[in-house]
Structure formats: structure tokens, C-alpha cells
Image (tube, grey):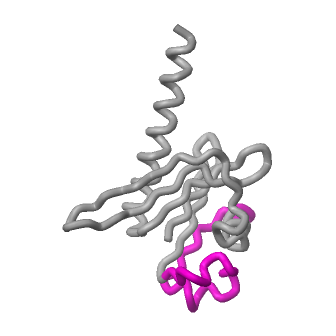
């Protein structure tokens, strides 16, 4: 019985993370989203998702990760700023507005819209949408 409950909780958590990333992408009007949580004092990516447009249908690809560090994956300066200030950052033209924040992470993709939200409901987490 305990094993069944433990497995059930894991399945529910994974589905929750998938659904949350999808909602974050939809609400931000983004193509890609990251769910970032604090784990043992380090901020890590726990889930990621991407919108794949195909024939007038929105298809979401989500992946639940296992505490992947944000280093070299997301602009650390922006993430650290949001963690420190709890402010929301929205860059409508990230290639121009974010010159002080952007680092080598996005040199190849050059996103137009970039946003990071800090949320705190019983635990602190970030939503990063591109």
C-alpha cells in the first residue's frame, strides 16, 4: 500500500509540473518555459516545456528534469536579480533591452520576449519564459 501511494505521489507531481509549465507558457505567450525551484540552497531547473506549432494546433512538449543547474542554460544575472528582488522582469525586445542582463546563453537564439516571474506559495519558485 505504501509503495502504491509513493508511486502515485510521484506520478501526480510529474503531471503537476508538466501542467504548470504548459500554463506558464500559455499565459506568457511564450515558446519555451522553465520551472525553477530552490533545492538545497541552489536554484535549479525542475521542468521545461516548449510550444510546437503544427497545423493550427498547439502541441506542448514538456520534460520533467531532475534538478538541472541554471548555469549556462539561462541568463544567470536575470535569474539572480529576480531571486534577490522578487521583482518580475519582462523584456519585450530582449536583444536590445536586456543588454545589461543577457550573457552568452542567448547569443545564438536572440529571443524577442524574455520574462522571469517570482512566485511564492508555500515554497519559492521562478517561472522563466522565452
In the rendered image, residue 123, in percent from the top left (x then y), is placed at 64, 43
Q: Is residue 39 left or right of residue 35?
A: right
Residue at the far top: name it.
1
Q: For residue 95, what is the image quadrant? A: bottom right
In the rendered image, residue 99, in percent from the top left (x then y), is placed at 65, 88
Q: For residue 75, what is the image quadrant? A: bottom right
Above or below 124: residue 117? below
Instruction: Name the residue rendered at 48%, 31% in the picture.
Output: 11
Query: Magenta residues?
Result: 83-111
Above or below 115: residue 3? above
Instruction: Name the residue rendered at 52%, 17% in the picture.
Output: 5
- Which residue is nearer to you in this view: 94 or 87? 94
Instruction: Name the residue rendered at 60%, 79% in the picture.
Output: 106
Residue at the far left: name it.
56
Residue at the far bottom: name it.
96
Above or below 104: residue 68? above
Q: Is residue 13 left or right of residue 41?
A: left
In the rendered image, residue 76, in percent from the top left (x then y), is placed at 71, 69
Instruction: Name the residue rendered at 43%, 61% in the picture.
Output: 50
Q: Is residue 123 left or right of residue 34?
A: right
Count every numbered label the image shows and give the total: 0
Q: For residue 30, what is the image quadrant? A: bottom left
In the rendered image, residue 128, in percent from the top left (x then y), is placed at 55, 64
Q: Is residue 35 magenta?
A: no
Residue at the far right: name it.
41
Above or below 28: residue 15? above
Amino acid at each position: 500500500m505504501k509503495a502504491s501511494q509513493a508511486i502515485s505521489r510521484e506520478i501526480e507531481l510529474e503531471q503537476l509540473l508538466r501542467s504548470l509549465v504548459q500554463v506558464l507558457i500559455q499565459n506568457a505567450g511564450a515558446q519555451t518555459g522553465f520551472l525553477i525551484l530552490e533545492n538545497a540552497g541552489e536554484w535549479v531547473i525542475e521542468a521545461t516545456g516548449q510550444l510546437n506549432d503544427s497545423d493550427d494546433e498547439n502541441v506542448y512538449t514538456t520534460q520533467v528534469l531532475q534538478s538541472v543547474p541554471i548555469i549556462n542554460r539561462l541568463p544567470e544575472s536575470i535569474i539572480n536579480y529576480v531571486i534577490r528582488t522578487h521583482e518580475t522582469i519582462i523584456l519585450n525586445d530582449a536583444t536590445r533591452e536586456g543588454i545589461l542582463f543577457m550573457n552568452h546563453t542567448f547569443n545564438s537564439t536572440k529571443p524577442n520576449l524574455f520574462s522571469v516571474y517570482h512566485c511564492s506559495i508555500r515554497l519559492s519558485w521562478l517561472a522563466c519564459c522565452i
